[in-house]
Amino acid sequence: MGGERGATVSERILMCGNEALAEAAILAGCDAYFGYPITPQNEISAYMARRMAEEGRVFIQSESELAAINMVFGASATGKRAMTSSSSPGISLMQEGLSYLAGAELPAVVVNVMRGGPGLGNIAPSQADYFQATRGGGHGDYRHIALGPASVQELADCMPLAFDLADQYLITVMILVDGILGQMMEPVVLEPKPRRTLPPKDWALTGAKGRGQNIVRSLWLADGALEALNNKLQARYRQIEEEEVLCEEYRVDDAEIIVVAYGIVARIVRAAVDQAREEGIPVGLIRPITLWPFPSQQVSRAANPRQDGGGGPFPVFLTIEMSAGQMVEDVRLAVAGKAPVLFHGRPGGGIPAVGEVLDKIRQLTIHGVRV
Amino acid sequence: MEVMVQDNMKTVFKRTSVLKDCPTHYCPGCGHGIAHRLVAEVIDELGIQDRTIGIAPVGCAVLMYNYLDVDMIEVAHGRAPAVATGMKRTNPDKIIFSYQGDGDLAAIGTAEIIHAAHRAEQLTVIFINNAVFGMTGGQMAPTTVLGQVTATTPEGRQSNGQGYPLQIAEIMALLPGATYVERCALSSVPRIRDTKAAIKHAFELQMQDAPGLSLVEVLSPCPTYWRMSPSDAMKWIESHMSKAFPLGRMKG
C-alpha cells in the first residue's frame, strides 16, 4: 500500500509520539476522545481537537480527569470506541473510573504519558506509574492490560492493538509512555491495520429496540454474585496472560548479564548493550512490551542455568527503570530466586545515560558477580 | 390480573408498560416509587422506550434498572452527567436521562452537573431532593434544611459550621447552557401532576433537539430518615422543604 499513488497515510512522516498515537487512534476507529489538559501530553488533545472535528467524530475537553474517564465510560457503554489521555496526576484521578470500567466489563483505551511524582512532581519523563498501571490502581481485584512501547512507531502500532484488545477482552488497555517518547519526533508510518475478529457488542446500550433491556452495572448484591463476576474476570485475566504477552529479547541467548528495561530506557540500554558487547561483555536485553501481562516466562527461561556451562553458571539480572524500583519486583517474581536480580533506578524525572548504564554493566564484571 | 373491559367501559388508568411488574425495594412512603412511575409514564407516552438510555445513580435509586424497562447503566457516585455526556455526544439520536439524588448530584457530583449544563449538553436530568442521604443511613445532605435532625446533625443542621441548604435549581438556572429548570414536589396529587408535566417537558425538549440541559428538581419524601409517618412527610414537604426550596419554573 505504501507505494500506491495517493496512499498518503502510508508515507514515512516525522511526528512526535503524542501526535502519532493520536492519528493512529483515529485510524483505529476511535469514535470519541475525552481529555483534560496536563503536561507533557497536551499535543494529544490539541491534535484530537482538530482531527476529530475533521472526521466528524467526538472531541470534548472535560472539566476534570474524573469527568473524562466517565465520558469514556458512557461512550464505551453504547458500544463506541473511546479513549482518554493524561499524565500521572490525572491518571490518579481516573482510578475510580478505571475500577468501574473493570467492574462493568467495558472496553477503554487510556494513554498515560508519565511524569515525575509523587504529588504534583515535575514534568520530566518518568516510569514511576508502573505499579499503578500493572496492579490496578483503583479498588477491587482487577487488572488492565498495560503496554510499554519504546519508539514512536511502536507507540503508533500500539493504538490499533489497544482498541482490539479492549474490545476482545472487555478491558481497559493502558499505554504507558514516558515524557520523552511523547515529545520526541521520529519517522513513522501510519496506516490502517486490519482488526482482529471481535465479538459483537450485544451488551451495548443502544436503546432496547427489538430486544430486551440491556443493563451495564458493577453492583452485585446477591449472595455469591460478585464472587462469580470476579471469578469470570480472573479467568479472562489468565487467558490474557496466556495469549497476549509481547516481549523483545535482544542478544539474550549467550548472555550472562541480562538487563531488563522497557520504554525509552530500553532504547538507552540497547545502546549500552551493544557497546558492552564490543568490550567482550556477554550482556543481553529483555524488553517487556506488555507490562501486564508481564513476560514472566521469558524472564524465567533466561534465568535458567546456561546449558553449555554444565548446570551453571546462572546469569545476573539488572533491571533499569526511571523509578525507584517497580518493574524489578516482577523480574524478581519471575526469576524466583534462581539468579541475582540487581536494580538501578532514576526516580523523580532522572534519565539514565548510555554511559551510566554501561558503567553499571561493567561494575557487574569488576565486582566478580561473574563473567 | 385480567380485567374484562365491557363495551360500555373505557380504560382510564393502567400500569405503564415501561414500569416492570415487580415490587420495589423502597421503604413505605418513599417518593422514588412515584418519581419512577412518572418517568416511566412519560417515556411511554412519548413513545421513546426503544431509544432511551437511563442512568441510575449511587444512592437509593441505584437499582432503578430493576424497575424501568429501558436500557440503563449504573455509574460512579455523582458522575452521571459526565457519563451521559459521553453517551449523548456519540449517540445524538438517543434520549439520555440521568436520575440522581441530592448526595449524588448536589454533593459529590456538583462539578459534573454544573459542567454538563455549562457545555449545554442535550440531556434530561431528574434530580430527587429528599434532604438526606437515604441509602447510607440518613446523614446530612447539602440539601438538608436548617434545623433538620439527621444522623450527622444530631442537634439539627446549623448554618454556622454545617452550611445552608444548597439550592440547585436556582444555581442551574443561572447557567446559559441550562435550557429548562423547574422545581416540583410530590407532596399532593396536584403537585404530582405538575411534576409529571415538568418531567415530560424536560424529555420533550431533548426530543426536539433543543440546545442545552433540562433539569427537574423534585422534592421527595423520605419518611424513614425524616422519622415521620408517610403522611406527615408529605405535610413536611409543604411546611418546611418548600420554604427552603421554593417551587416553580426557574427558567425556560
Image (cartoon, coloured by chain):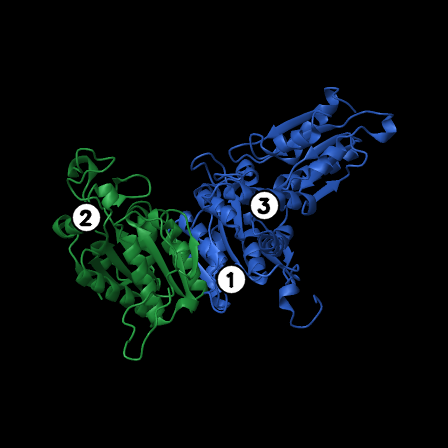
Q: Looking at this view, is B149 or A162 the one in front?
A: B149
Q: Which mark is residue A232?
A: 3
Percent across and percent down for residue A222 are 47, 44
Residue that badge 2 annotates: B233
CB under 8 Å between discs 1 and 3: no
Mark 2 Cα-neighbour bin, 10 Å: few <14, some 14–19, many ≥20: many
Residue A289 in view of the camera: no
Disc 2 versus disc 3: distance between alpha carbons? 45 Å
- In the shown orientation, is residue B149 left or right of residue A26? left
Tell how many labels. Answer: 3
CB under 8 Å between discs 2 and 3: no
Disc 1 versus disc 3: distance between alpha carbons? 28 Å
Q: Secondary structure at mark 3?
A: helix
Q: Is residue A124 above or below residue B188?
A: above
Q: Secondary structure at mark 1?
A: loop
User: Which color was chain B given?
Assistant: green
Disc 1 versus disc 2: distance between alpha carbons? 48 Å
For image coordinates 54% across by 45% down, the residue present is: A229
Percent across and percent down for residue A6 are 64, 72
Mark 3 Cα-neighbour bin, 10 Å: few <14, some 14–19, many ≥20: few
Do pointers 1 and 2 mark residues of a single chain? no
**In which image quadrant can residue B154 be found?**
top left
CB under 8 Å between discs 1 and 2: no
- In the shown orientation, is residue A79 left or right of residue A341? left
Front disc: 1 or 3: 3
Q: Looking at this view, is B49 or A47 the one in front?
A: B49
User: Which color was chain A given?
Assistant: blue
Check disc 3 and give the amino acid type: Lys
Q: Which mark is residue A31?
A: 1
The subunit carrying tag 1 is A
Q: Looking at this view, is A247 or B196 the one in front?
A: B196
The subunit carrying tag 3 is A
